[in-house]
Image (tube, rainbow, N blue to C red):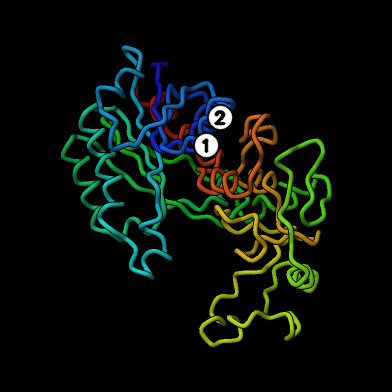
Amino acid sequence: MTSISAVDLFCGAGGLTHGFQQAGLRVNAGYDLDPACKYPYENNNEAKFILKEVEKVTGAELLEHFPPGDIKVLAGCAPCQPFSTYSRRYGKEKAQKWKLLKDFIRLVQECNPEIVSMENVLQLKQHQIFQEFTTALEQLGYFVIPYDVDCLNYGIPQTRKRLVFFASKFGQINLILPTHDKISFETVRNTISGLEPLAAGQSSKTDRLHRCSKLSDLNLRRIIASQPGGTWRDWPDELIAKCHVKISGQTYPGVYGRMEWDRPSPTITTQCFGFGNGRFGHPEQHRAISLREAALLQTFPANYQFVAPEQPVTFTSVGRLIGNAVPVKLGLIVAQSIINYIKNQL
C-alpha cells in the first residue's frame, strides 16, 4: 500500500495520535502549546512532541515531518471552547478563538497535504467560520465532507457526539460504518468495574492514576443519598444546595449525579474528577470517578501514562489532559476510514 503518515495539530496528551497508531497510520509529530502534554505524548506514542503555538507553525516546517513520497495527512482538534453551548450562552465566542481554525486552513494552504481531518464539537457547524473553512478547502481542490458522529456507535462508552471532518485531494472519504448498536453499546461496567475499590480521597498503591478526589462531609452525605442515574432532586431537602432551590437552578439537574453501571457515561470533561461537576459519581462507591477511570472511559489503554514517575499526579493538570483528549477509539475510526479509502482508491 502507498505509504501514509500524519502530523497531529493540537495533539494534547495523544488520544488522536494513539488511535492513528493503533490503526497502523504513522504519526510523525504532534504540536501543542501545553508543556504538560510532552510526557504522555512521547512516552506512549512513537512520535515527536513539539511545544509550539499553532500561530507560529509554518507549512514549510510541517513538510519537514513527511518523508518524500508519503501521502500527507494533517489532522487535529482545534480547541472547541468558543463553539460550546456554555460559550454561546454567555457570549464568550470571540474572533480571536476562531483564529485557530484560520491558522489550520493557513497551514493547509502552505503545506498542501493530500488529506485533512479535524474533530470538533457539533456546534461548530452553526457558525460562519465553519462555512468559510469548508469553502476555503474546496477552493484548494479538496473534496470535503463532515460527519455527525455518535461515539456510542463506535465502541466509546460515552454519550458524546462529535463532528468528524474529512477533506481529500483524491475524492470523498467515507467514515467507516458503525461497529456497535444499542444492544452492544459499551457501558461503564464493561469499562471500569475491574478496578480496585477506593474510598473518597484514596489512591491505589499500584496505579498512581487510579486516585479520586476528597469529598466534604456534606458531599459525602449527598453521594450516599444519590442513586445511579438520579439527580440531586432525589435528596432530602437538607442536602440540596441553595442554588438548586432557586427556580434558575432547577433547570440544571445534570450535576451531583452517579453514573449507571449498565449505561454509557456522560461526556468526560476536564472537571470529571469532581462529584459536583456533572454526573461523575461512581455507580456504587461513594466517590467521584478516578483519573484512571476517566482515562478508560476516554478509551485510553489501561497502561497509558500521563505523568512522569518523578512528577506528582494533580487532578487539575491530569484532568485537563484527559478531558481535552480525542477519545483514542475515535482516532482509530478516523484513521481506519482514511486507510480504507487509500486502499480502495489508490
Q: Residues within 10 Å of mark 1 (few under 14, many from 20)?
A: some
- Find residue 65 and report its horizontal and vertical position in percent: 36, 19
- Find residue 38 and report its horizontal and vertical position in percent: 51, 30
Answer with left or right where residue 249 lies relative to residue 148: right
The image shows residue 325, relative to residue 201, as above or below, that is above
Q: Residues within 10 Å of mark 2 (few under 14, many from 20)?
A: some
Answer with left or right where residue 294 lies relative to residue 62: right
Kindly indicate the quadrant of the structure image that contains residue 243. Answer: bottom right
Kindly indicate the quadrant of the structure image that contains residue 22. Answer: top right
Which quadrant would the C terminus be assigned to in this image?
top left
Find out whether the residues at labels 1 and 2 contact each other: C-beta distance under 8 Å.
yes
Kindly indicate the quadrant of the structure image that contains residue 299. Answer: top right
In-front residue for pair 206/67: 206
Circle 1: residue type: Ala
Which quadrant would the N terminus be assigned to in this image?
top left
Answer with left or right where residue 206 lies relative to residue 327: right
Quick one: SS at disc 2? Answer: helix
Quick one: SS at disc 1? Answer: helix
In-front residue for pair 2/96: 96
Answer with left or right where residue 88 lies relative to residue 332: left
- Circle 2 residue: 39
- Circle 1 residue: 36
Residue 93 tag number: none
Which residue sits at x=46%, y=32%? 335
Which residue sits at x=56%, y=29%? 39
Toward the top, the furthest residue is 68
Residue 324 seen in this snapshot = yes
